[in-house]
Image (cartoon, rainbow, N blue to C red):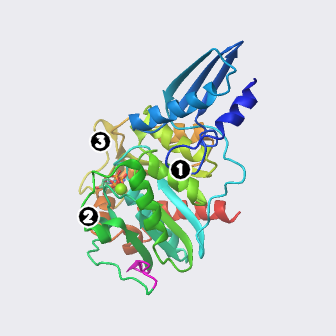
Amino acid sequence: MDQSQILDILKTIQYPGFSRDIVSFGMIENIRIEEKSLTLTLKLSTQQEGKKKEVVALVKEKLESTGEFDSIAIEHVEGAPSGPQPAGQIPEALPGVKHILAVASGKGGVGKSTIATNLACALKNQGHSVGLLDLDIYGPSLPIILGIADQPKTTAERKLIPIDFHGMKVMSFGFISGNETPTIWRGPLVARMTEQFFRDVEWGTLDYLVLDLPPGTGDVQLTLTQKLKISGAVIITTPQDIALSDVRKGADMFKKVQTPVLGVIENMSGLQIKGNIEGDSSSVTIEGHPIDVDESGNFSFKINLFKTGGGKQESDRLEVPLLAEIPLVQELMETTDQGKPITLSDPESDLSRIFADVAQTVDKQLQG
Ligand SMILES: Nc1ncnc2c1ncn2[C@@H]1O[C@H](COP(=O)(O)OP(=O)(O)OP(=O)(O)O)[C@@H](O)[C@H]1O
Ligand SMILES: [Mg+2]
């Protein structure tokens, strides 16, 4: 037996809870055959030990049943699956929605929701019809960020009608669950709920549906990339996170399931301080750095609190553009967290322009 025959056998094994097989998920890392002994390395990204054991047992049973090998060793390594997308398994598009745009990161708290919201607003400012969907079932943020306490209404067909937010259609699991986090739910159930929730929303026609994804590379993300035709993903990282494997896994997952990664945004990229000085401003310094002060006494200064260049490194590694470096700005936090995104309230501000540029680049990439 050679490697390709073994792959053919492994292709008949479905990843538990999914309709896709373990080969197409990219879970086969290595196959080594030496006469009658076979060593197989699996790459399993799930956090659930039970699931890993189940996959190993299924593989072992299948390979043993061939009777071709005296010894079969199965190893597994952690990590996002790699490998090609299966032929013939075409994820579904959402009728009426031109582009699904995922905002994702391997790690939590890096600014996905903030960026997804402002990017959606920037796309809307550019004349697109836009929806924004918070897919974080464990910790939905849109109800808080947008200050929405309304319950969505339903259509006669019992589909959820998105809530209008300044002309955008928004939906969050938090709108129906009252922000109670069902932490006892396990990965596969959450994945199923997420998909069901996704399909139960009446989006109508949209140019863009922006997805605020939960952090990580678990079952939810796998389900989404398996079942939905995501036009492109924007990866959010922070300057100091580059060495973290979580961050890499997040981006690699999309690349490997052939969802185009449109680019990387480095968030919290330095701390932007603006101010005004009265009187003599010829030799002002902050932390020892000389500051340029204009004739009206205004200055702007960026302090790099963390390491720099994380976004650039990650975009180089993925061979995609670095779409933006967004500094830490109190105004961005305040405006977004108060449900008044700066991209809507002050579209000409420096910050809003950053989002407008990203929106334009993304739009160009997807149209082209
Ligand atoms: N560039 C920024 N400047 C200032 N504050 C920011 C910036 N980006 C994000 N924040 C703030 O950091 C916090 C975390 O951001 P956010 O909720 O968008 O992250 P997240 O990646 O969606 O988190 P989670 O993984 O929990 O969903 C928020 O309070 C947000 O306002
Ligand atoms: Mg969030």
Pick whichever, 43 or 99, lies toward us: 43
* Residue 224 relative to residue 295: left or right: right
Label 3, label 2: how far apart the Cα atoms are: 46 Å
* Residue 203 relative to residue 67: left or right: left
Residue 71: which quarter of the image? top right
Where is residue 294 shown, x and y percent of the image?
Answer: 37, 56
Pick whichever, 302 or 166, lies toward us: 166
Q: Is residue 182 above or below residue 313?
A: below
Residue 125 counted in the magenta span: no
Q: Residues within 10 Å of mark 1 (few under 14, many from 20)?
A: some
Residue 159 counted in the magenta span: yes
Q: Secondary structure at mark 3?
A: strand
The disc label shown at residue 18, or none: 1
The tag earlier along the polypeptide, 1 or 3, is 1
Where is residue 85 shown, x and y percent of the image?
Answer: 66, 46
Q: Secondary structure at mark 2?
A: loop
Quickly name the residue at label 3: 285
Residue type at mark 2 is Asn
Where is residue 264 shown, x and y percent of the image?
Answer: 52, 48
Q: Is residue 20 above or below residue 113?
A: above
Which segment is the magenta one?
157-167
Pick whichever, 366 or 295, lies toward us: 366
Q: Nearer the viewer, mark 2 or mark 1?
A: 1
Quickly name the residue at label 2: 179
The residue located at (34%, 41%) in the rendering is 290
Residue 162: which quarter of the image? bottom left
